[in-house]
Image (spheres, helix red, strand yellow):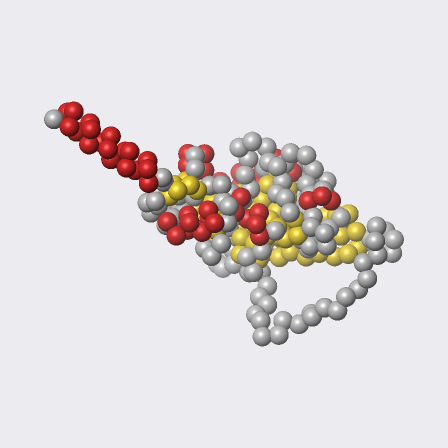
Amino acid sequence: MPVLSLGAVDGQCFQQANPGGGRNLFAILAKDVVGNYPLPEHFNADGTELTALPTLVATKKWSQYLFPDGTLDYKIDDSGDPSFQSYKHMIEFMMAGKSKALRAEMRKYINAGALFLIEDKDGEYILVFSTDDPGFLKKSFALGKKGNDKRGYTLKAEVDGLTFGLVTLQSSLLATLSPNLVPLPA
Amino acid sequence: MLKNYRIVDEDSHKNAGAIIPGFGLVPLDAEVLTDDMAKAAIAAKSPFFEEVQEKTQKTARLTGTNNDSQTA
């Protein structure tokens, strides 16, 4: 493996907006992905983009989750001692309310790992977790004491030991992605 | 509404969406989408849209005329 020496990088966002937060969130169970994803051959040369989508079990699709504004977060840490380092992914979001549909969806995550795609404010799609190390959501529900206390689910998952950090889908792949959407209101 | 384009195998895309350059995430619903969106999707090599062939339209019209004349 060649040594990749450091280069000069502009870490400012001079005259550019740099907003945080996600625009869309999609999920799929690791069991609904055929084989392992992502594998080393699914990355571009510098490991910053995925050049292939996962092969999904027939009829399965990524599912869209509409989350309350400002509740989605995604973090990556490099963790481990030198020579033992790998990546840690963390995702957190909320789902407001307690509808039967929401409860039924939350039930599907018992002992079931998932992968997530986050569309950020640049319109780029970030892959969270892998089939080797899927995220197991910890769900906590709060009824709220009264009034405008937040009633709903808070969902968190964190997994370490991943082989990749922040990676996005190559833009040419997006046209072939067809997730299940929450139906438009009638 | 789509006029000169159609969604490939529309029935299998119930409640599904597509990501179209310049438009973002949109539902795969012929009633909601426009020809401009389908054209942009095809340009991005989306497999979910196809152009309605003009020849097919003419053939359909001719067939209709023949049927009408036969009926008459």
Q: Residue at the bottom extreme?
A: A15
Image coordinates of residue B7 in percent, x first then y, are 41, 40
Residue located at (20% from left, 27% from top)? B67
Image coordinates of residue A143 in percent, x first then y, are 54, 51
Residue A91 is at least partly visible in this image = no
Image coordinates of residue A130 in percent, x first then y, are 69, 43
**Above/below status of A109 relative to A120:** above
Q: Nearer the viewer, residue A84 or A186?
A: A84
Residue located at (24% from left, 35% from top)? B61
Q: Quadrant of residue A21?
A: bottom right
Residue located at (53% from left, 53% from top)? A24
Q: Horizontally, is B37 left or right of A15 in the view?
A: left
Q: Horizontally, is A119 left or right of A182 in the view?
A: right
Q: Nearer the viewer, residue A91 or A180?
A: A180
**Above/below status of A39 relative to A156:** above
**Above/below status of A6 relative to A103:** below
Residue located at (53% from left, 44% from top)? A176
Q: Residue at the top extreme?
A: B70
**Above/below status of A102 relative to A10:** above
Image coordinates of residue A44 in percent, x first then y, are 69, 50
Residue A104 is at least partly visible in this image = yes
